[in-house]
Image (tube, rainbow, N blue to C red):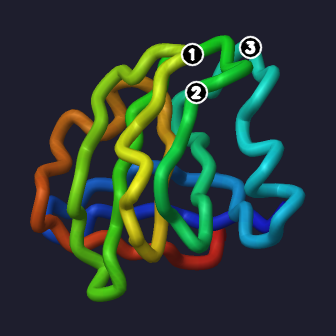
Amino acid sequence: MRRVRVINRTRAVVLADSAELADNYWTRFMGLMGRRELPAGAGLVLKPGGGIHMWFMRIPLDVIHVDKADRVTHVLRGIKPWRFGPLFVGNKLAIELPVGAADSTQVGDQIAVDPSQ
């Protein structure tokens, strides 16, 4: 999978140095299922975004939903395995991060996803 960098431009915070970009059916379907950990600086960017579920997940996550104008529309903090996030979210991106990585992010913040260095 390609790697990208996720930045909260509003707050000048790097949310993920090396997130995976899931931009096809298979990578979006598999997501982070089965992983035992998500290290600091890592993440998964689901493109297109939308509703997420935590079925078959082993770790809790922070999830940020981003619209077509690159603004945050929802922030889920510490969503636990075997739960559903908001399902009917027609967003550009859903960004899955380790718990705590989205602590400074608020609805309305501008997010950038750039190629990883």
Disc 1: which residue: 82
For the residue marked with disc 3, what is the amino acid?
Arg
Estimate the spatial distance between the alpha carbons at disc 2 and disc 1, rounded to whole Å. Answer: 5 Å
> The C terminus lies in which quarter of the figure?
bottom right
Disc 2: which residue: 54
**Residue drawn at the location 43% of the way across and 48% of the way down:** 87
Towards the viewer: 60 or 82: 82
**Residue drawn at the location 36% of the way across and 44% of the way down:** 86
- Taking the view exactly as shown, the residue that stands out farthest to the bottom is 69
Where's residue 22, x and y in %?
73, 62
In this view, 109 is above or below 81: below
Where's residue 40, x and y in %?
52, 30
Q: In which quarter of the image is residue 101?
A: top left
In this view, 103 is above or below 113: above
Asked whether, in this view, residue 107 is left or right of residue 91, the answer is left
Tell me the element at label 2. Answer: loop
Disc 3: which residue: 36
